[in-house]
Amino acid sequence: MKQRRWQDSILGLTVLVGFLAAWQLAAVVVRSPFLPGVTDTLGAFADLALHGDLDGYSLLTHVAVSLTRIAAGFGLACLLGIPLGLLMGVYPSVYRNSRTVIEPMRFIPPMAWIPIVIVVIAGFSRYLFIIWLGAFFPILISTLAGVPRVNQVHLDVARVHGATRGYLIRRVVVPSVLPEIFAGMRVGLGVGWMCIVAAEMLGGENIGLGRLILKYAELFKLDYSVAGMVLIGLLGLLLNEAFIQAEKWFFRWRWEVTV
Amino acid sequence: MSGKLNWMLVAALTVAALVALSSSYLFHLMGPSPGESKSLRVGHLVADELHQPGWCAAQELGFISEEGFEPVNSEYMNGPAEMEHFAAGELDVAYVGAAPFLTARAAGVDIVAVASSNTEGSSIVAGQEIRGVPDLNGKRVGSPGIGTIQDYILTRVEETHGVSFTHFYAKITDLILYFERGEIDAYIGWEPHPTRAVVEGIRGAHTLLTSHEILPGHQCCVLAVRGDMVRNSPEVVASIVRWHVKAQRWVLDHPDTAEEIIANYSGLSVNLIRAAHPVVQHNYPPYLDLTSMRIMLEGLMASGKIDPKDVPDLDSFLNQAVDNSFVTSLLQAQRLSPNATFEPQVAASLPRVAMAPRGVVSVPVSR
């Protein structure tokens, strides 16, 4: 088992090094100022980390601001998506009667909302809405889809022992659906994180990783933009890994939990 | 079994790669060959016809088709966005602000400015509580993008007036919304967008400064073309400059009709265009103003927007980036005085300057 893990680590590292080498090689061969190589990107990253951006904002400020926006949007998506998903799962008629609204809404990309969001919503709420929109539906749908999968035997046993509807929901349905909720949250976090560029593009404010990318792209300093992209990717990876570890810890009794 | 699966995976990936390669080659073959294209890809900015009347007036009056071009117009939310598409090889001609043009050129985009579209033409508008530039200190001021000429002008205001404010970036047509909602205290933009807030009386808006007061006579939008066209097909560039010059002259001679065309193309009211028109100068002959472009270049380098390493010699850089010779040749060959006028019906009979034969002008397509 340990040897297998080592093999996987070495293979993963080899793939990463191969990818970086191919990227650098492509940059050297193409020799275009619009295709920064690994070294250019690292240089830009170091410059941002040491000196901040053109407007004087440090890289940490950008990261902190983006994470705050993500946390707010994602948190709101959880607060609304989980109870609503449970409600619709437990009372399918709620879903049936509202699906004509929910289902089409689910397929409208967050970017498509931008024109109306600019007019209707102001300030921090704009970021919140776009990120919420990205994260909400995966959470809602996973929760909703998890309820019918609750083991019927568990429900029947509880009923035989005189469990009320409220007890069934609190003590049987919710614990059973938690892994699906967690999986939905993980997907929602990923989508919400992907919406950060769109959200920060319409926000107008000068801070945030999405805005950092756009700012330098406008100035053709694509090495800085790529540094921002890589940072968004790495932070997303870290958040995802943290989620997986939390999932594994919370549901260590459940063998299905996988990466 | 696992080995067999691996081989199948490798085979599938190889087939996918071959399909991708062959289809991209076929796509390459399907495109117009160099020298055979009939269309001319012209870029301009969203609702910026007052700064860039050349393309719409020329199109409306048939000046472009007289030169044998079939224009394909593309609209961009600001100059930097347009330059990104230009760098991607999607445009042959760009009507764009001098600052994004210089930034793109410094970054290595093969682009040359061949004529002026307008000088000055931007304004800062503010709410009634802002009575003077010092009141902007610590406030939020909207700009259509960090790489735009308007943002450069904002930085210049900060430097010359000793104030500091937060730049807030948004699409030009959205700035008025942010202003109305009180998310920004003032904003700069290309006309007529700042004047719109004044005309509509939003938050008691008034014009705080025009760009004339910030950098008098400064170059604003330019007509730029692909560098390889200047080197390899100067006759094509001469044709482009020709319809542009004719359109610029026509706009000066027929301001009322031009304003109607501009309003129609930009989707804004003609009264608004008329109110903002005096702020915008359509210089004629449309020579590019090197003095202000040099000042701008220095400013862009000082603020870190252009890396000084990319511009080791300012004069040499500007000499290569800016080419006024096409305008000069056109005027000389046509023996035109700077006050010559153009009418659509007589334009076709004017002598041509080292231009391609009538009919469709070939535009080499670079890949």
Image: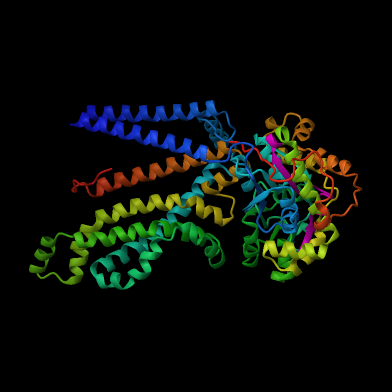
Magenta-highlighted residues = B207-229
Residue B13, x across and y down, in percent: 34, 34
Residue B6, x across and y down, in percent: 25, 31
Residue B219, x across and y down, in percent: 79, 47
In the rendered structure, the answer to whether residue A93 lies left or right of residue B272 reads left
| Position above or below: A45 against A130 | above
| Position above or below: B116 against A170 | above
Q: Is residue B209 magenta?
A: yes
Residue B229: quadrant of the picture: top right
Residue A247, x across and y down, in percent: 28, 48
Outermost residue on the left side: it is: A160
In the rendered structure, the answer to whether residue A178 lies left or right of residue A125 reads left
Mark yes or no: residue B305 visible. Answer: no
Q: Which of B205 and A159 is in front in this view?
A: B205
Q: Does the magenta stretch include residue B339?
A: no
Q: Which of B53 and A42 is in front in this view?
A: B53
